[in-house]
Amino acid sequence: MKLCMIGTGYVGLVSGVCFSDLGNDVICVDKDLNKINNLKKGIIPIYEPGLEELVLKNYKNKRLNFSTNLKDSVRKSDIIFICVGTPTKRNSNSADLSQVYAVGNEISKSINKFKIIINKSTVPVTTGDELEKIISKKVKKKYFSVVSNPEFLREGEAIRDFIYPDRIVIGSNDSKSQKILKNLYSPLISKGAKFISTQRRAAELIKYASNAFLATKISFINEIANLCEKTNIDVEDISIGIGLDKRIGSRFLRAGPSYGGSCFPKDTKAIVSTAEKFKTNLSIIKSVIRSNKKRSDLLSKRVNSILKNKIKNKIISFLGVTFKANTDDMRESSSLKLIPFLSKKGAKIKYYDPTGPKKEFKKLKNVQFSNSIKDSIKGSDIVIAHTEWNDFKSINFKRFSKNKKLIIYDMRNIYSPEKIKKLGFKYFGIGR
Ligand code: UGA
């Protein structure tokens, strides 16, 4: 099939590349000429394991192309995916849909035959209705169909999530499009992905409700972890103990710092805001947002108490600063709160991240990037394992540090407390 992805951000690029790898002809469109030229040279704008190889392979065999020409790309395609950003509006909690609508307007000028226009961007309920209205100003309804097909890709695992999704959700009020899209996704369906066809509005809500539910699960286990710390219980046992109940499920029950990234913080706020528009109070999600906000303060205070209120001049080593492993994304990472807090209190911070130094910390006093795990740990008073990269899981702390009083604060529970204690170091984890 001939596809066109509008927006080569995270969703558009990964989905476009994966669709081309499944044998479709795909054009990835972006208005950023520099990005498009780079992609043609195999320079990938984001860090995502496995993506570069797939781009190179499919660009070389000509199933994948890149363009800044939206009009021409739409004309050449049967299915058009809108994959532009829906950030939080300034001074508001609702999603800014201006890019989605602007693209809808552009598409409407280029429709030369029947097109399926798919919204893959995360959007509030009724956005599809609005998009349909915008396009129908220029095009008769029989020439297009607006569909919602949300994505459930995680950064760092996006390619695997695309190829082996739990489910594919198609929200469309028209059966012809449902059929075509089932065919498009058939290689994944035959590998076991469940195909769900539903109303367009329902698909839009499935996306927000999924993210809000996952954020709720994380905040829930984080609060249980707080209780575990007071009662001398290991939260890891609780996660296993409750997760084995199939009604609960074991995934997304890892306690840690506040959840971050470009999705959960933004989407939880947006669903609350949408609900308010429809005079519905999503009190559970509201309290999840509050709980997550408080979490960084709580962990800052915990570092303070671990260091017995003597942060000044302490050398603190951060292992990993991104919001999670296998990504270079800093958006809403808890390190953006923890590191400035500690630096303000007079600590000297050395951080190492496998994806390199971060501009966010450039201007902070006493915050320095270390070139290796060893350099970061050497000479420090406390090591904070902030992100769960595999690189950090088997560190030989004894070899890297001569400090007999070294403290390990394991914010992802990746180490065995017993092993660390056996080495003679002090260990603190989350909820244990
Ligand atoms: C999330 C969803 O998981 C995807 O399904 C969705 O497609 C995506 O948002 C999106 O809407 O685009 P992502 O933000 O890439 O994906 O990352 P996650 O793996 O979900 O992690 C989000 C945050 O939750 C991270 O800060 C992570 O450390 C935290 N987390 C996750 C926990 O603290 N504990 C867990 O058990 C799982």
Image: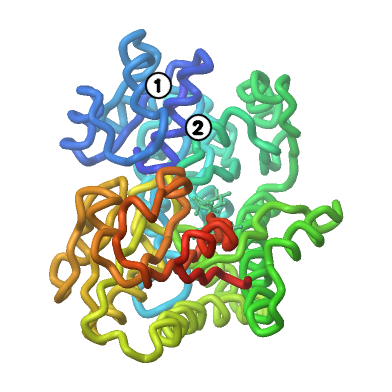
Residue to which mark 2 is pinned: 159
Of helix, strand and loop, which one carries label 2?
A: helix
Q: Residue at x 46, y 19 (%)?
A: 20
- 137 over 334 or under it: above or below: above
Asked whether 59 or 113 is in front, the reply is: 59
Asked whether 127 or 183 is in front, the reply is: 183
Q: Answer whether residue 70 is visible to the viewer in this image.
A: yes
Residue to which mark 1 is pinned: 54
Asked whether 48 or 269 is in front, the reply is: 48
Seen in the image, is 38 located left or right of residue 262? left
What is the count of numbered marks? 2
In the rendered structure, are the residues bearing label 2 and label 1 in contact, judged by CB atoms less than 8 Å apart? yes
- Quarter-of-image position of residue 402: bottom left
The quadrant where ligand 1 appears is: bottom right
Which amino acid, mark 2? Answer: Ile
Percent across and percent down for residue 3 are 46, 24
Seen in the image, is 38 located left or right of residue 288? left
Q: Residues within 10 Å of mark 2 (few under 14, many from 20)?
A: many
Percent across and percent down for residue 186 are 67, 21
Which amino acid, mark 1? Answer: Leu
